[in-house]
Every structure is written in C-alpha cells, then in structure tokens.
Amino acid sequence: MQSFIQDTQNILRGIKMSLDFNKLISAFVGIIFSILWVLVILAFGSAFKLIKITPFEIINGYLISPRLGLCSLVNVFVESIKSVEWGEYVVLMVLVLGLMLIWSVFAGAVTRLAALEFARGEKTGLKDSLTFVMKKFWSYFWSPLTPILGVLFFIACNVAGGLLGKIEFAGEIAVAVGFPLAILSGFLIVFLGIVGLIGFVLMFPAISSEGSDAFDAISRAYSYVLSRPLHFLSLFITIIVCGTILTFVVGYGACFVMRISYFTVGLGMGGKLNEIRNFITGLSEVGDIVSSLNPITMRIAALLFMLYIVLVKMIVGSIIIAFTGSASTIAYLILRKDVDGTEIDDVYIEESDEEVAVEDEMPEEPVEQKTQLTPESIVPPVQEKSDVPEK
C-alpha cells in the first residue's frame, strides 16, 4: 500500500513537470509539424483519389471547431478505416511513418528532459536534449516500429501458408499439417502486439535514460512488463486516470476561458462578435459562406479568431503530451529500480566536448625517479690525503 501511494505521488509529480516551458515547446512544435504533415498527405491523397477524406474536413471539423474536437477526430478516423482499400493503406503507411519521424524527435526530447529532471533534479536546455535525441534518432524511430514489423511478418507468414491451400489436393493437406505453425505464429502476433502496445510507453524513456539503442529499449520494455505485470498495470492505470483528469480539467478549463473571453468582449462589441462566432461555427456545415461576412475586416477578424482557437487547442494538446512523456519516464525509472535494482538517479549523461578537451589538456603528474642504489651511493668515497704537510 505504501508503495502504491508513493508511485501515485510520483506520477502526480509528472503533472507539475509537464508545465515546464521546454517540454511544452517541444510538444507544441511537434503538434505543428504533425498537423502540417497530416494536411499535406491528405491533400495529395485526395487529389489522386486514393482517399475520400480531405484536409478541409480536418480543418473544419477539428481545428477551427469551437469544441475541443477530440471525439470528432476519433470518429473521422474510425469512419475512414471501416472500408480500407489499397490506396488508403499506402496513404496510412506514409502518414504513420511521417508521424513517427516527427515524434521520434519531439517526444524523445520530452522524455529526455523528464528523465534528467526526475532522476537528477536538473533542468537542461531544449538544445541539449535535442542534440541528444538526434544522436539517438534511429533508436527512437525503430523502437516502436520493430514490434509492428514483427507482427506484420508473422501475419504475412500465415497469409503465405494460407495461399498453399489453394493448391489442388495437396494444398489442403499441407495447410492442415502445418497449421500448428500457424497457431504458433498467431501466438507471437498476439504476444508481440499486446505487450508491445502496452510496453510502448517505456521504450522512449528507456533510450532517454540509458542512452541505449532500440534493441535494448525493446528488451527492457518487454522484460519490465513481463517481470512485474501487476506493478506495471498499477502505474499504467494511474497514468491513464491522472491523464484523463488532466485532460478534462485543461480542456474544459480552456473552453471556460474562451467562453468568458467571448462574453466579456461581446459586452462591448455587440452583435459583430456573434456574427463572427456564427460564421466560425457554421463553416463546417456550409460550403462557401465567406461572402456572407462583410466587410472584409470582419473576415480578417474571423480568420484571426480561428487561429486563436487552433492555438488554444494546441496548447491543451502540448500539456497532455508533456504529461504523457513525463509520467511514462517516471514509471520507467520506478520499474527499473524494482526489476534491476538500479537507483533512480542513475541516468546516462554524455560528457561534452569541452570537458573531454579539458581532461586531455590536464598535465600529467610528474613521475618520481627512483634512485638506483649502488655501493658508491651507500659508502661515502674515501677522501684522498693531501701531500701538503700540515702546519
């Protein structure tokens, strides 16, 4: 019980850590690049008739909507994958790979900042964390991708085995004889998929804390989940509960602030503000109503209000991402101590080039020369008598 309370307090500390300026900036920039990437890919995909959803649906239904838009975004994603064709698979693969490239940098920076702050109480700069991430970029990129490739490989093995069943007469027998291999492959699909999915939250923190490669991060994630499943689940559930509460508070807090801002400004601006708000709200339902808002200054004001709505949503998303990275790093360090016995403050630190140069320039300590003992050095030489007579 005491351990659970301590773990909960540490996870709650992640809320405070998520308000760090450098983590928020890293998450904010990552969201900007992600939005741009999604819009560009959807634009190309819809232009070549590979997908039905257009970037304007994302902009109108999620970005500039007065609502938070998370549920609507999930609904759009679910509706889009109900009937997936080959063109949509290509677009989805390109989209996912691009997002993984983006968040390998910015999510890695968040976990690196969180590892140093929680373990050593140090708040390093964003430049140093990004420098570290770029050195370990491919480790961040491949660590979550490797389990996915493993799942796809065993799926392909089962599909290839199923193709043998199309062979006349011998095909059915071959599939029946080799079906135990399909069962084994199915087990590996479930094992790699489920454990990899829930252990994904430990991979980036492992690289940020250990300075290791993708294989070490994957092995640590699987090992910690399987070695301490109950401890991991308690930490995982605590992160979900705290993250849900944080999302609710921050999201509805932002909506409340926007409503207060609209109300107080509307007291002075009057009906003009209502026209702008109605324009923004109805933009996703009406095709072209730009001409309904006159004069042109009202349109410029509406565009600026849309920008403010997008910025507020991005700030909310940055806080949630920063908390996720901080809390997952805290959970990793706690599990590492439980499984390996490694102290919390043991985090990989790279020596800077200046420190290495100073060590190289330090003068070596002089070596004491040993005097070789000889008979002459032990027995003093006999003084020769002088021929001059003494007076």
Image (spheres, helix red, strand yellow):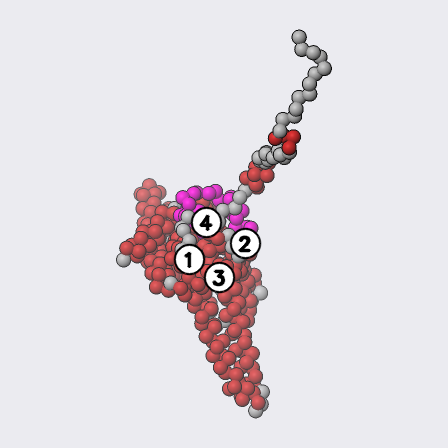
Question: What is the number of the mark on residue 347?
Answer: 4
Decide which of tag 3 and tag 1 comes sooner along the chain.
3
Nearest the viewer among 82 and 326 is: 326
Dot 3: element? helix
Q: Residue at left 43%, top 43%?
A: 122
- Identify residue for label 2: 137
User: Magenta region, mostly helix, strand or loop?
Assistant: helix
Decide which of tag 1 and tag 2 comes sooner along the chain.
2
- Identify residue for label 1: 340
Nearest the viewer among 170 and 311 is: 170
Dot 2: element? helix
Classed neighbour count for the residue bearing mark 1: other residues with Cα under 10 Å, few (<14), some (14–19), many (≥20): few
Q: Which residues are magenta?
A: 110-135
| Residue 322: % across, % down | 41, 51
Q: Nearer the viewer, mark 3 or mark 1?
A: 1
297 on left or right of 243: right
Disc 2 residue type?
A: Phe
Disc 1 residue type?
A: Asp
Q: Is 328 above or below relative to 350?
A: below
CA–CA distance in space, label 3 to label 2: 15 Å
Image quarter of the C terminus: top right
Decide which of tag 3 and tag 4 comes sooner along the chain.
3
